[in-house]
Image: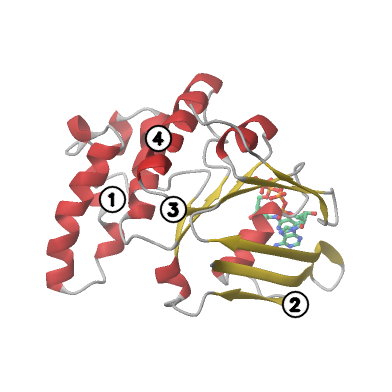
Amino acid sequence: TTVMRFDHVVKKYGGSTLAIDDFDLEIGDGEFVSIVGPSGCGKSTLLKLVMGLEPLSGGAISYSADARSVSAMTGMVFQQPLLLPWHTVLDNVLVPSSLQSRAQRKADQGWARELIEMLGLEEFAASHPYQLSGGMQQRVGIARALLHDPRILLMDEPFGALDAMTRDQLTMDLLRIWETDRKTVLFITHSISEAVLLSDRVVVLTPRPGRIADTIDIDLPRP
Ligand code: ADP
Ligand code: ADP
């Protein structure tokens, strides 16, 4: 089943910069789709359109019939993990819980601990962000995005700010997590190797304006 669908999506900034031109894509349940392309080709713009942070200039983005609100549908991982420095790891993972009912907040506590363990951070639940490496901070960001079990995980260059070794390690970790919990993922990166390793499908964008240059189905045995 299709979880998310882009239909002839167009985005112009300020009436002049054409960032995305006629973008079509269907993402199926449990599919891992990467969007690759050089800097400035409109990758971040696509995610902003999905999140409703920017209005569309044309076309439509739709969700499967059982979709809840966009915020419940999606979990977002940014290039910078944007953690609250004065909160512990556990409390950072629980940030999306703060607006929930008391009963839900209680239920979230247990799940947050499980996620922290799944991401290999169990020893750091009570630590503060400044005590963690960049890679560990990004794991906290991933756990936070997974807290409310979104239908789609959106990731915008999640490893972009990390050194090469940490980046490789986190790529493998993400693969492992994804194998146990087959989430639908829309992954933005400028790294072709990362995209090929992680994805079922790689969508390649042209530089300015972003148009689909190629779509590649990946059928690699996963490690
Ligand atoms: P990235 O390539 O990692 O997406 P950029 O440096 O291109 O980062 O952009 C950083 C931020 O600045 C983004 O939020 C983007 O939307 C915004 N931005 C990029 N280009 C412009 C521009 N010409 N005018 C205003 N904001 C811009
Ligand atoms: P990428 O994420 O692939 O680096 P972006 O989506 O950030 O690309 O940007 C795509 C194009 O849109 C770029 O030419 C960028 O300068 C422009 N752009 C991005 N955000 C803005 C903005 N807020 N205002 C004007 N132009 C923007």
Whether the residue carrying mark 3 lies under 8 Å from ligand 2 is answered with no
Q: Secondary structure at mark 1?
A: helix
Q: Earlier in the sequence, mark 2 or mark 4?
A: 2
Label 3 to label 1, Cα distance in Å?
18 Å
* x 42%, y 48%: residue: 82
Label 4 to label 3, Cα distance in Å?
12 Å
What percent of the width, then of the height, locates residue 128? 25, 38
Q: Secondary structure at mark 2?
A: strand
Q: Are circles 3 and 1 on residues that touch, CB within 8 Å? A: no
Q: Circle 4 is placed at which residue position?
A: 176
Q: Circle 1 is placed at which residue position?
A: 93
Q: Circle 2 is placed at which residue position?
A: 59
Q: Earlier in the sequence, mark 3 or mark 1?
A: 1
Label 2 to label 4, Cα distance in Å?
35 Å
Label 1 to label 2, Cα distance in Å?
35 Å
Q: Earlier in the sequence, mark 3 or mark 2?
A: 2
Q: Nearer the viewer, residue 172 or 124?
A: 172
Q: Earlier in the sequence, mark 4 or mark 1?
A: 1
Q: Residues within 10 Å of mark 4 (few under 14, many from 20)?
A: some
Q: Earlier in the sequence, mark 4 or mark 3?
A: 4
Quadrant for residue 145, please give it: bottom left
Q: Circle 3 is placed at which residue position?
A: 183
* x 81%, y 56%: residue: 210
Which is closer to the viewer, label 1 or label 2? 2
Q: Secondary structure at mark 4?
A: helix
Inspect the image, locate mark 1, and give the three-letter code of the amino acid beneath it. Answer: Val
